[in-house]
Image (cartoon, helix red, strand yellow):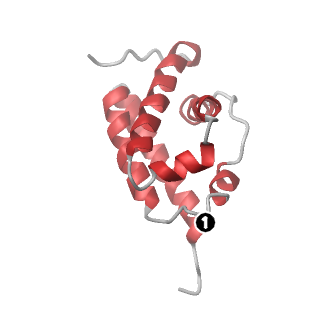
Amino acid sequence: MEPALTHNPKADRPLIRNFVEQFYTAARQNEIIGPIFETALKDHWDEHIQTLTDFWMTVLYGERSFKGNPFLAHRKLSALEDGHFDIWLDIFHTTAKTELHPALAEKAIDKSQRIASSLRQGLFFNPAS
């Protein structure tokens, strides 16, 4: 059954939270990126889910609930490698297609690709190579 989409941030917030929870459930099970999340977040998963729900509400709905700096958060992850973003994107795309209305999934996937590209450039770009 296709998830209902209201285009109303208050009504759709539970949908986005469920999407974020499902994504991180899958990401945590990945043998490559799962340990990076577990090391970084330890016992702070509930807080992280709330923060990322706020992030995706801001990205997808323009709701100004996210307060943070994704670049700085990712910069602190010493184990993070450029190729990890491909794994992240694959899990994200699969989860979006499964958990979100097709139009919202398409928007989320487009935004995720732009965000990953931006983070990759900021974290791993080396003009000398």
Q: Nearer the viewer, residue 105 or 73?
A: 73
Residue found at the very far bottom of the displayed protein = 128
Left or right of 62, for residue 81: left
Quadrant hosting residue 92: top left
Q: Secondary structure at mark 1?
A: helix
Left or right of 32, for residue 39: right
Left or right of 3, for residue 38: right
Residue at (47% x, 29% y) in the render: 21
Residue at (54% x, 63% y) in the render: 120
Residue found at the very far right of the displayed protein = 67
Q: Nearer the viewer, residue 49 or 10?
A: 49
Identify whether 94 is placed above or below 36.
Answer: above
Check disc 1 and give the amino acid type. Leu
Q: Nearer the viewer, residue 17 or 3?
A: 17
Horizontal and vertical percent position of residue 110? 43, 45
Q: Are there few (<14), some (14-19), or many (20+) residues within 10 Å of tag 1?
A: some
In this figure, which residue is indicated by the disc labeled 1?
A: 123
Identify whether 128 is placed above or below 20.
Answer: below
Residue at (61% x, 43% y) in the render: 41
Name the image quarter holding the N terminus. top left
